[in-house]
Image: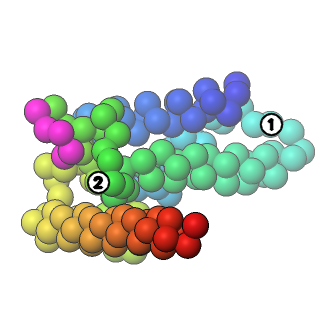
Amino acid sequence: MSETSVYSEVRKIIADKIAAGEIVIVDWLTHEIVAGKPGIEGTDTEFYRVCAYTHVKDLVKRCVGKYDARPETDRQLTLAGFEHLQVAYTVDREGRVTLVPVDQLSDSEIIGRAKAYDLMAEGCRAHARELRSYLRERRSAA
């Protein structure tokens, strides 16, 4: 099994859970995936389980991270009928990164995510202004 196929498997598991209306907690999903692969045997079993857990957790974090706030929404994550609204968003619940279907977010979580996008937009506009200013200065120096 290749890195790409494991990554694809993790992405599918997450997408299926979100489609089923399930909340995804990184640590719990990592444990579920590793527990579902019990074929590690031999004297070094514990070593390979730790390695597998660490690697799978990294993959789960990367896949869940696709739902983080970004300037552009991945079309695969967009809720049907919307241009930007995602099927799920990451939020912090009780100190844990949690991927929550949009219809299960609390009002305050939705407001918090909207504020994060507002701040991101301000930062992107400031970045664009600096780029244009830099270009003007560079052109005038030439």
Q: Is residue 76 left or right of residue 106?
A: right
Please state the horizontal and vertical placement of residue 20, each as a whole percent of the image.
Answer: 25, 35
Residue furthest right as drawn: 43
Q: How many marks?
A: 2
- The structure residue drawn at horizontal position 19% and vertical position 46%, both measured from the top left corner, is 85
- Sequence order check: which comes first, mark 2 or mark 1? 1
In the rendered image, which quarter is residue 136 located in? Answer: bottom left
Q: Quadrant of the N terminus?
A: top right
Q: Main secondary structure of the magenta part?
A: loop
Judge whether 21 appears above or below 5 on screen.
below
Please state the horizontal and vertical placement of residue 139, each as a whole percent of the image.
Answer: 50, 65
Residue where numbered disc 1 is placed: 41
Magenta stretch, residue numbers:
81-85
Residue 16 seen in the figure: yes
Q: Which mark is residue 134?
A: none
Residue where numbered disc 2 is placed: 89
Q: Give the secondary structure at mark 2.
A: strand
Residue 57 on the magenta segment: no
- The structure residue drawn at horizontal position 45% and vertical position 53%, both measured from the top left corner, is 65
